[in-house]
Image: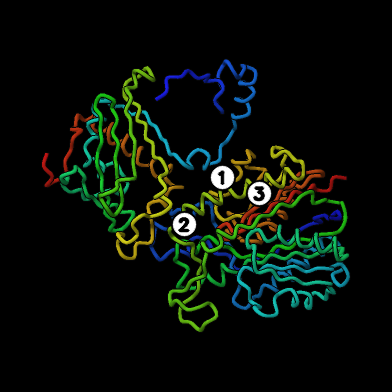
């Protein structure tokens, strides 16, 4: 790695106070600020949602870090089994009929991040990655509760099923066909998550529920 | 191109009107409130023995009354688009000409560009006027698939069956500058042409003898993509036509589009930042009129006093699953 100093202002597409004056910056901001934005421009390659939830951040973290809670707040993931040796849990994604979906939770308690590494049909390459972060709302909104941030990135496999041979026979849909509906579908699920977490918080229920037959 | 004007439009709607109950099985409450019924209350269905030619003839007689036309003399071009063609070989245009006693230079029966074929016909007519000396053109859009296809006992309970409605709209173009067509923009998207199909449960080709009816099918796995494509295509082509006409989008006075469902109507209007009253449609009473929506909604705009002198009228839409988009800008009787 070279330690040579560079002039940041000479790098293409870098606009800073030093190389891009306030008047030009204001003009650019005016130009970039539209009244409406095409759906694809906002949700074409990345899909980020956020919500305020009346529930402490640590409780939300605990709930999200338990894969079995996906059976509660997602629209269609059901019938979770035990984790395998790699910590991957099999369940069924009902939007794909009999489709199996594999999930590994990658969580960081200090950062309050919970990432779900998932894939349809096979557990070996978990490329559908749901990135979630919980932020204590007192910090960012000066109010109780938490902010939940949720991002998906459009992996090329959304456009091209890498393992069509592993799909159940006669399945007509591919998860990536639904990418244009990801904002809407994930908003519904985030609303579910908020409603369930707030209910559990109000009623003093556990944030680490387990389905019957799955060891705690 | 020589100056060409849209002189007016007129319509004919079949007598049979179906309410939402027609598409519900007895006691089926769920479908009555389902998304397919959202925004639609009524739609017309063509009668068994009624043809697209009958409908065009009635609408054109109404147009002739409004504009004071002598149809034996004042029709140089006849262009038609019929959604479910009932004269497959000869085509409707020649029979329309016979019934009305017209003596056109050209007849063109279009098979493509479906729901926005009115704009395509405007474009073709303007070209023929410029190059062949035609002075007038009768543009005819007929939607017949509601009664022909979706009223069938095996189809009427499909979720899609309540959406289409039949009707005929006709328009009259003249080589003049009375209501000038300031710009037309069109684009073909061949890559999107395979996402809508005509299907039948017996799997046979449409011309083959059969025991099950045909219906229209959108590739299940492509529905989300088609919705997002439709949301984007129409505002894009409208902006392109407005730019060519040097018209700021916010100065659109009347917007007329095809009317596939209320969500597309809302999204297109929102995308162009237009108030609801500027977007004229008849979805609630007529359902999805396919190509006929454009001339019928233009007539609605005229009848409700929205076509004031100098009004900037913009027409736009897309066909099928997005294989074609078109838009036109017309200034209504500026002088």
**Residue at the spot x=23%, y=50% of the render?**
A91
Asked whether, in this view, residue B42 is left or right of residue A100, the answer is right
The percent position of residue A119, horizontal first and vertical second, equals 30, 48
Q: Which of marks 3 and 1 is in front?
A: 3
Query: Label 2 near label 1: C-beta < 8 Å?
Result: no
Asked if residue B241 can be seen in this view, the reply is yes
Q: Do labels 2 and 3 share a chain?
A: yes
What kind of element bears circle 3? helix
Count up the numbered dots: 3
The percent position of residue A71, horizontal first and vertical second, equals 25, 45
In this picture, is B160 found above or below A27? below
Residue highlighted by disc 1: B267
Residue highlighted by disc 3: B237
Query: Label 1 near label 3: C-beta < 8 Å?
Result: no
Q: In which quarter of the image is the C terminus of chain A?
A: top left
The percent position of residue A79, horizontal first and vertical second, equals 21, 50
In this picture, is B236 found above or below A65? below
Residue B222 is labelled as: 2
**Residue at the spot x=38%, y=55% of the render?**
A161
| Mark 1 surroundings within 10 Å by alpha-carbon count, few (fewer than 14), some (14 through 19), many (20 or more) | some
Asked whether, in this view, residue A86 is left or right of residue A38, the answer is left
Residue nearest the viewer, comparing A102 with B216: A102
Q: Distance from label 3 to label 1 (Cα)?
A: 14 Å
**Residue at the spot x=29%, y=61% of the render?**
A168
């Amino acid at each position: 790695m070279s330690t040579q100093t560079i002039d940041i202002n000479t790098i293409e597409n870098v606009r800073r106070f030093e190389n891009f004056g306030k008047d030009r910056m204001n003009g650019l901001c005016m130009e970039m600020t539209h009244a409406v934005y095409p759906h694809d421009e906002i949700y074409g390659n990345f899909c980020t949602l956020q919500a305020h939830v009346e529930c402490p951040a640590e409780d939300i973290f605990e709930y999200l870090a338990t894969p079995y809670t996906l059976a509660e707040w997602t629209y269609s993931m059901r019938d979770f089994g035990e984790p395998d040796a790699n910590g991957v849990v099999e369940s069924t994604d009902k939007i794909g009929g009999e489709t199996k979906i594999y999930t590994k939770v990658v969580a960081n308690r200090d950062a309050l991040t919970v990432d779900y590494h998932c894939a349809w049909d096979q557990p070996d390459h978990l490329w559908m990655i749901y990135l979630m972060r919980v932020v204590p709302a007192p910090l960012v909104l000066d109010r109780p509760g938490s902010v939940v941030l949720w991002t998906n990135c459009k992996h090329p496999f959304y456009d091209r099923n890498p393992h069509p041979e592993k799909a159940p026979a006669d399945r007509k849909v591919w998860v990536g066909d639904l990418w244009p509906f990801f904002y809407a579908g994930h908003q519904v699920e985030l609303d579910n998550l908020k409603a369930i977490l707030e209910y559990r918080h109000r009623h003093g229920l556990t944030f680490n529920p387990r389905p019957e037959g799955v060891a705690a | 191109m020589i100056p060409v004007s849209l002189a007016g439009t007129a319509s004919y709607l079949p007598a049979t009107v179906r309410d939402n109950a027609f598409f519900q099985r007895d006691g089926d409450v769920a479908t009555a409130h389902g998304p397919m019924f959202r925004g639609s209350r009524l739609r017309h269905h063509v009668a068994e023995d009624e043809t697209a030619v009958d409908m065009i003839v009635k609408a054109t007689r109404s147009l002739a009354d409004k504009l004071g036309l002598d149809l034996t003399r004042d029709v140089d071009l006849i262009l038609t688009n019929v959604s479910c063609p009932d004269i497959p070989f000869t085509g409707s245009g020649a029979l329309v000409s016979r019934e009305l006693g017209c003596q056109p230079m050209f007849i063109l029966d279009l098979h493509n560009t479906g729901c926005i074929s009115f704009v395509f016909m405007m474009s073709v007519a303007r070209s023929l006027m410029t190059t062949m000396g035609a002075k007038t053109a009768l543009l005819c859009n007929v939607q017949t698939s509601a009664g022909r296809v979706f009223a069938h006992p095996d189809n009427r309970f499909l979720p899609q069956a309540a959406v289409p409605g039949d009707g005929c709209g006709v328009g009259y173009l003249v080589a003049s500058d009375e209501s000038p067509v300031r710009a037309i923009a069109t684009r073909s998207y061949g890559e999107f042409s395979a996402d809508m199909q005509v299907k039948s449960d017996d799997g046979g080709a449409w011309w083959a003898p059969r025991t099950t009816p045909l219906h229209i099918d959108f590739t299940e796995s492509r529905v989300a993509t088609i919705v997002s494509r439709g949301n984007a295509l129409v505002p894009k082509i409208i902006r392109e036509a407005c730019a060519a006409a040097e018209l700021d989008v916010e100065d659109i006075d009347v917007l007329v589009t095809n009317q596939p469902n209320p969500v597309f109507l809302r999204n297109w209007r929102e995308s162009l930042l237009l108030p609801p009253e500027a977007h004229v449609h008849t979805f609630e009473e007529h359902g999805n009129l396919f190509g006929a929506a454009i001339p019928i909604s233009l007539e609605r705009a005229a009848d409700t006093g929205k076509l004031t002198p100098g009004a900037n009228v913009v027409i736009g839409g897309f066909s099928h699953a997005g294989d074609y988009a078109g838009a036109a800008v017309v200034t209504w009787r500026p002088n």
